[in-house]
Amino acid sequence: MPYDTLLVESAGHVATIVLNRPDKRNSINTQMIADLQSALDAIEQTHARVVILTGAGSSFCAGMDLAMLQAIARQSPSENQEDSRRIAKLFRRVWSYSKPMIAAVNGHALAGGCGLATLCDFTIAVPEAKFGYTEVKIGFLPAIVSVFLTRQIGEKRTRDLLLTGRLVEAAEFKDLGLVNEIVPADRLMTRVQELAEVLIAVSRLAFPARSDSLPPQLPPASTPIWNARSSRTPACATLPTSRKASPASSRNVSPSGKTTRTIPRTKLSRSSSSGVISKRDSRIGRLLPAAFVNEVSLCVSTTCLLVSIADY
């Protein structure tokens, strides 16, 4: 099946997706998002067991297309929210794809392109490649990718990358754990094919449908997870302690004579009309890590609402 923004090739048990907008440094537009979803759906129905993602020309992916970013200023909040859902759905698809995915980063991977590169199961890059979540430099905050990135490298490092928007060498990204290997450009596809062969040689039983095995919520275990039955209603948030929560706050005297306080569970709610998470208890700061509360505010303020990632 031909695609407007991709080249898709199959050889044996390996499928290769090439982001094919070299004149635009393979930047992501609405059509590319749709093409990637369709290509991944189609490959899932084939005998391919490994998927390689790379870029045409000298760049891997420069992030969102400039014209698409300029259009955001003219869109309504509901249209911006729909754009956020589309990119969230794509990121979740790559993150939880049922076949191993290898990113062959042949050049710069910036903003959303950096997200695509690092959400694959394996990321192999050339030494010249640079990475960065540069959205902050043009007035955007990468709220959606922050959920995945925090899980991968932790809160402190995530804040460094997202709030500074700095460009990072491949070697530093490897030290952060976001790149698996760095190989010369003339050996990139050879090394990627070698890794693909290793993965193909492994029993198929080793690769279950990971979308079913992943937790429904993406932030680290230190944050509350979404209720498994409904991603729109977060589960009760509790302190990491063995004390039992009671309907109301209470003080107890332990055998050692120390006074301890039991803090009640507190729920979050989401407005059905706006999709915005709200606090139902002023004590929420005691129960949730500050990064999670900040992340919610971040998503709301940029209209990049993480309202349905777990649904996808």
Image (spheres, rainbow, N blue to C red):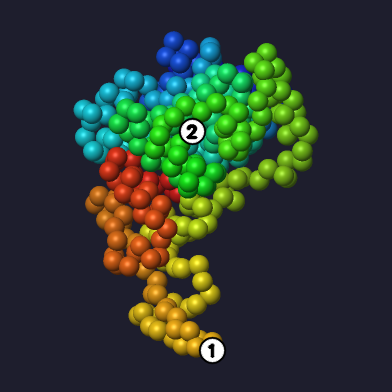
Residue at the location (71% across, 29% down)?
196
Question: How far across and down, in percent of the image, does residue 234 sit?
Answer: 40, 59
Q: Distance between the residues labelled 2 and 1?
A: 51 Å
Residue at the location (54% across, 44% down)?
153
Q: Is residue 94 left or right of residue 303?
A: right
Of the numbered discs in the image, which one, if any, rests on residue 115? 2
Q: Is residue 34 above or below residue 311?
A: above
Instruction: Name the amino acid, label 2.
Output: Gly
Question: How far across and down, in percent of the image, does residue 146 sit?
Answer: 44, 42
Residue at the location (34% across, 20% down)?
66
Question: How far across and down, in percent of the image, does residue 99 sit?
Answer: 63, 36
Secondary structure found at label 2: helix
Q: In this view, does 134 lie above or below 259?
A: above
Question: How far across and down, in percent of the image, does residue 269 sit?
Answer: 32, 60
Q: Is residue 134 above or below residue 253?
A: above
Q: In this view, does 180 lie to the left or right of 197?
A: left
Could you say which quadrant of the image residue 270 lies in?
bottom left
**Is residue 40 visible to us here?**
no
- Mark 1, other Cα within 10 Å: few <14 / some 14–19 / many ≥20: few
Residue picked out by circle 1:
255
Secondary structure found at label 1: loop
Residue at the location (35% across, 37% down)?
141
Q: Is residue 299 left or right of residue 98?
A: left
Q: Viewer-proximal residue, 205 or 118? A: 118
- Mark 2, other Cα within 10 Å: few <14 / some 14–19 / many ≥20: many
Instruction: Name the amino acid, label 1.
Output: Pro
Looking at the image, do the residues carrying marks 2 and 1 touch, with CB atoms under 8 Å apart? no
Could you say which quadrant of the image residue 142 lies in?
top left
Could you say which quadrant of the image residue 170 lies in?
top right
Q: Viewer-proximal residue, 48 or 244? A: 244
